[in-house]
Amino acid sequence: MSVVDRYRLIFGTGITLVVIRLSLRLVSLPRLLRWLTCRPAEGAGRPAPLDKIVYYVDRWLTLFPYNPKGNCFPRTLALYWFARRRGLPVQFCCGVMKLHQRLEGHAWLMLNGGAFLEPSPYWQSFTVTVACPPTSSPSHEHPPVSA
């Protein structure tokens, strides 16, 4: 990856996160998910490897955290968009679980029935409340509910 491509990727991931954060304040989640569920990009040259995209998304979220409890929501939305542009049929999932008499939330990606670009098995503890695009067969023990 050339220096120019690297800086283009750094700024591209940062801009994507800014747009997602602003959109979360201005539009509903179902609308944002419709916008992010795009067709694969054509004629854009060779796309950056997803591991590099994950690295820069995570670095941006370390520098500018979305929430003191975690960055899974904007991280998953950004990676959902990047993966869909590459033609990967990933699914955006949000879920909740009860922990110490409170509800905790988490967002993650699924691909072919397994977690995708997820750093830990933490997602397995959650009951899916939103899945986009919806599936007819559950990818784990909790059935998804479409957005």
Image: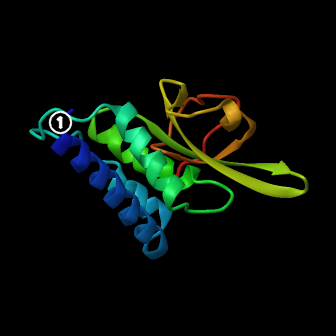
Q: Is residue 48 above or below residue 23?
A: above
Camera sees residue 89 = no
Name the residue at 43% across, 75% down.
26
Name the residue at 41% across, 68% down.
23
For the N terminus, the image quarter is top left
Q: Position of residue 10 (x, y in %)?
A: 31, 49
Which of 137/12 is in front?
A: 12
Q: Position of residue 19 (x, y in %)?
A: 36, 65
Looking at the image, residue 48 sits to the left or right of residue 120; the answer is left
Name the residue at 45% across, 66% down.
21
Which of 94/44 is in front?
A: 44
Q: Is residue 49 above or below residue 12?
A: above
Q: Position of residue 17 (x, y in %)?
A: 40, 58
Q: Position of residue 102 (x, y in %)?
A: 84, 58
Looking at the image, residue 108 sits to the left or right of residue 87; the answer is right
Looking at the image, residue 79 sits to the left or right of residue 137; the answer is left
Q: Amino acid at mark 1?
A: Ser
Which of 1/112 is in front?
A: 1
Task: Quadrant for residue 48, please give it.
Answer: top left
* Residue most extreme to the right: 101
Look at mark 1 in the image and give the residue it sits on. Answer: 2
Q: Dot 1: what SS? A: loop
Name the residue at 75% across, 54% down.
104
Within-10-Å neighbours for mark 1: few <14, some 14–19, many 20+: few
